Amino acid sequence: MNKAHELLTSFKARFGTGASIYRAPGRVNLIGEHTDYNDGLVMPAAIGFSCWVAIAPRDDRKLILYSQNYSEAYEADLDELGGRGSGHWTDYPLGVAWALQDAGYRLRGANLYIAGDVPLGAGLSSSAAIEVSTGYSLLLCQRAENEFVGARVGIMDQFVSCHGRAGHALLIDCRSLEYRSLRLPPKVSLVICNTMVKHKLQASEYNLRRAECEEAVRKLSAALPGIRSLRDVSLEQLAENRSLLSETLYRRCRHVISENWRVRSVADLFERGKTDGLREVMAASHDSLRDDYEVSCQELDAMVEIAGRQRGFYGARMTGGGFGGCTINFVDVERAGEFQRRVSAGYETAMGLRPDIYICEASQGAELVETAAENLPKVTR
Ligand code: GLA
């Protein structure tokens, strides 16, 4: 039974009607970490793990949510959403509903059956997948997570969950929101290694990094009037104005500004279908995240180190917000299975934890999978 059919059957059993089905994928970021909220460049790809939402309207103002993953139902009233989450899985769909209503959309009640296979808490954007599949409305989804869930994240995760393209990475300019898809080199597999250290999008550290970047921009603008974000500062300007910043702020800026350059160089390689030099750029990104931005951890460092010893290896680094979660690895297609076995054994010996290792393909972004025409929820403004 395919996923859509399975969801329709489960929805019918629970709510007694047909439904429309939306799907939105998780993502892995290939390069460009902690640059999105600095108006910079990122290069994520959507992956073959998704969140699915079956939905049908109700005649009242209730949202009845059911999560297959948590085997849990939840009832909310559209008129009593408030502006804050409660730390529960329902924050993501309710945050989207709140953001839509706050933007002036009048929603009607609905039954939602939610099921996903994006690994939870692994830094592969299961949250963006649930937001996009429930909301399917990019900027509003971003607002939902910032103000409702409480992590001041950038635009990358939701953007690629919407616009991902099979076999391609997206090069996104997070200032203009212009983007281009880049074909991944055909001989390369995307292998994601999960450290199994739980990644609670460590909201406080994440928000602190973001505040540090903003503080650095304020300080630098004394000498560089007109800058709006670190996107506007070059490495030369940073070096010239080092005395305006503390050592920590200087290193935070050096990471963000150099990372934008690394995104450009990987884009340039992929545009030419090449992989030479990829290993060095990925290693420089990891080192910069570890030493200058200080968002790596022992497990991520070990995973990258073990990967670097394998055959068919084209480069690796931590991916996502940090403090656990996954690494992204470029591996020769022919060697991906062997890589998976060897890294798994190596990491288990080193850390005493068995990692999950996924051999992935870049996949398509959000889509309407199934329409129950008579059931389409109407949104009026
Ligand atoms: C998290 C956030 C993204 C981005 C990354 C770091 O995944 O959700 O917006 O800032 O961290 O690159």
Image: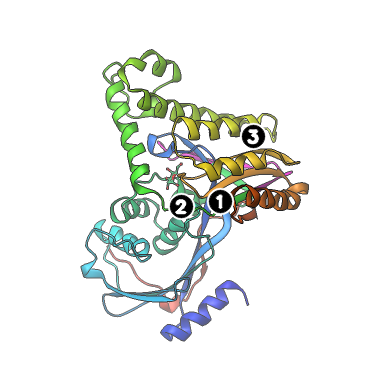
Residue that appears at 59% across and 34% down: 282
Image: magenta residue range: 171-190
Rendered location of residue 20, percent (x, y): 46, 73
* Helix, strand or loop under label 1: loop
Instruction: Say which residue label 3 marks.
Output: 271
Instruction: Say which residue label 2 marks.
Output: 199
The answer to which image quadrant residue 211 occupies is: top left
> Which of pointers 1 and 3 lies earlier in the amino acid sequence?
1
Could you tell me if the residues under marks 1 and 3 are in contact, i.e. CB atoms within 8 Å? no
Left of 286 or right of it: where is 140? left
Instruction: Say which residue label 1 marks.
Output: 195
Q: Check disc 2 and give the amino acid type.
A: His
> Which of pointers 2 and 3 lies earlier in the amino acid sequence?
2
Marks 1/3: CA distance? Answer: 31 Å
Could you tell me if the residues under marks 2 and 3 are in contact, i.e. CB atoms within 8 Å? no
Number of residues whose C-alpha sits closer than 10 Å to that of mark 1, classed few (under 14), some (14–19) or many (20 or more) = many
Q: Quarter holding the N terminus?
A: bottom right
Left of 103 or right of it: where is 176? right
Q: Would residue 189 be counted in the magenta stretch? A: yes
